[in-house]
Image (cartoon, helix red, strand yellow):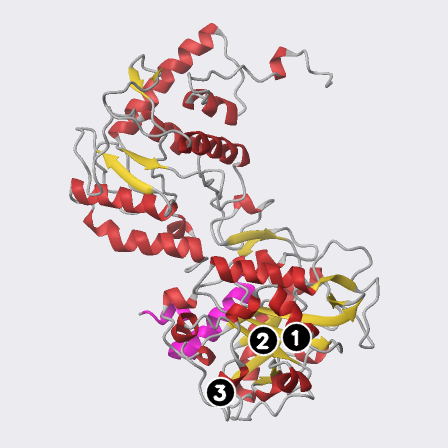
Amino acid sequence: MSENAGDSSTTKPNLKRNGSGELDVFEATRYFSDFNEPTMAESSRIQVQKQSIVTELRQKRIHPETEDKLPEPRVVIVKPQEKEMKTRGGGGKKLTSFLNSLLRSAGLKKLKSKSKSTPEVESPRGERRRRHSCVVTVTTHAAASSPISGAGAWSTRRRSFDEKHVKGLGSKKNDQKLNMRFCESLCSDKKVEYKDRNGEDGVNGGYESDSVTTLVLLHLSSIAFASSHGSKQLGYQCSSDEECSVGLGCFKCGIDAARCVRSNITDQFSLVNNSMPFNKYAFLTTHNSYAIEGKPLHVATQEDSITEQLNSGVRALMLDTYDYEGDVWLCHSFNEQCFEFTKFNRAIDTLAEVFAFLTANPSEIVTIFLEDYVKSPNALTKVFTDSGLKKFWFPVEDMPKGGQDWPLVKDMVANNHRLVVFTSDKSKQETEGIAYQWNYVLENQYGDDGVKPSECSNRGESAQLTDKTKALVLVNHFSTVPVKLLSCEENSQHLIDTIKTCYVAAGDRWANFVAVDFYKRSNGGGTFQAVDKLNGGLLCGRDDVHDCHH
C-alpha cells in the first residue's frame, strides 16, 4: 500500500452515483480534473462561481469560425449502440473511459415512454430533471486552427462539413440541422434526434421526454476534446503531440528542440477526386515498412506500426520476404537469407494489418513492393490467401502494358481491386500471378546514391527513367544506413529537391511513389508536403494539391 494511503489530502473523494449506478456529470468533471473535496466555504464559493459561469456562457456562446451568436443552447440526444465511442486525439484517456462506460450502460437500457417514470437527478441549481444518456455536439473546428490544409482524413471531413453547412446559421432551424449533422458525423452508427428548448421536434423526429438540462452541454464541453489537441502551430517548440494542432506531431531531430511538424497526409481523393487513372496520383511509401523500432540489435527504419503508418496516410509498403523456419518472414537481412538477429515478424501478421485496414476503409488502395527472396513454391500465394488479402487482389492480367494508363481509381474501388502487389522475382509473375515490378514501374537508385538532390538515375533492374512504356515511377530517398536523428534533414528540403530532379530525369514526369525512412521526421511539412507537391503536379500542374480545387 502507498505511504499516502491514509492521507486525506491525496485521496480521491467518493463519487456520487444515481440509482442506475452512473456517475453524476458534475462529480465526473471533478474527478477527471483531479479535483479534491472542498471545504464548506470553498463549496459555497464554487457553487456561486459555477452559476455565474453557466449564466455567462448561456448568454454569450460564439461559433468558433463565424463568430455569430448561436441560438439558445440545445442538447442532442443520441441513442447509442453497444459500440464504444473512441477519441482521435492523444489525451483524455480517463474521459474516454468514462464516456464509454456511460454509452455501454445506456445501450443496455431501452428508452421509456412518458407513461413510465425515469430516474431523476438533481442539477446544480436544485432542479429535478429526468436523466437521459446524451452526447452533445461540441466541435473543436480543428481545421480552422491548423496551419495546413488537409491535415488528415478526420480534420478534412470535419472541415468539409463546416464549409458546407455553416452558411445557414442565420435561421434557428438550419442551426438545428447543423448541430444534428455534426453529431451524426461523429457517431455515424447511431440514430440522432434532438429537441430545442421549447420542446419542438427537429428534422429527424421527436423524442418523448422532458427537457434535458443544458448544463450537460456546458460541462462536457469544458472537459472534453480540449485535452485532445493543443494550439501550437507548425514549427513551434513542443514537448508532446498533445500540444500541437490537429495534423501535427511533436518530433525532435539532432540537437534541436522538438517542434510541431506535419504528421498526416492530405487525402487527394477527397480533396480533388478519385476519377483519374491510378497512375495520375502520388502515394507516400515507407522503406522497409516492417523494420519497426523495438527489437534489440535490429536495424530499424520506421517508428510506427503498419496500422499507424496506414492511418497516417502511407499507401505503399516495402516488404522484404524470406523463407525462415518453414514460413514466410519479413527480415532486414543479407545474402538472401534470414537469421534470428535479422528477422522482424511473420509476413502474415503484417498482411493481417493491411487486411484490417482495407476492410475498414473501403475506398482506399494499398500498394506493396516485395523484395522477394522466397524460394518455396507458392509460399507467397499461400500467405496472401491465408491473410484474406486475395479478396482485394488487382489481377496481373488487368495491369496496363506499353505505358498505357491504369484503370480509374473509382473503378478499382468499385471492383474491389484495392491491393496492388509487385515482386522483385520475375518468375513469380508466371508461377503465382504476382506482377514483376520492373515490367510496370521505373525506379531510381536507392541508398546513398538516391539521396543526392542533384542526381537521379535508374537502379540496375529498372529501365531508364525516360522509358515511356512504364506508367508508374518510384523515387527512393533514404540513406544506406538509416539514422533517425539525421532523417529530419533528409525528409525536408532535400526530399523536395530530389523529386524535382527526378521529375526532369524521368522526362518531365512526377513520381507516383516516394519511399522514405522515419516518414514523420522532418523540419516542417516533410514527406507529407512532398506528396502534396507530387499530387499537385500530377493532378493539375500546380505546386501543391491544395491549389487543384481552385
Q: Earlier in the sequence, mark 3 or mark 2?
A: 3
Give the label on residue 400, or none: 3
Foreground of the two, 26 or 500? 26
* Label 1 Cα crowd, 10 Å radius (few <14 / some 14-19 / many 20+): many
Tell me if mark 3 has few (under 14), some (14-19) or many (20+) residues whose alpha carbon lies within 10 angstroms of its own: some
Determine which quarter of the picture holds residue 289. bottom right
Q: Secondary structure at mark 2?
A: strand
Residue 75 x %, y %: 29, 32
Residue 390 in the figure: left or right of residue 298: left
Please indicate, yes or no, whether residue 381 appears anywhere in the rendered image.
Answer: yes
Question: In the rendered view, does 246 fall on the left or right side of 73?
Answer: right
- Where is residue 77 drawn, in percent x and y? 31, 34
Q: Amino acid at mark 1?
A: Leu
Q: Which mark is residue 370?
A: 1
Please name the residue that numbered disc 2 is placed on.
421
- Location of residue 542 by image quarter: bottom left
Residue 132's place in the image compared with 189, above or below, is above
Residue 384 in picture, x, y percent from top left: 62, 69
Which residues are the magenta region? Answer: 524-549
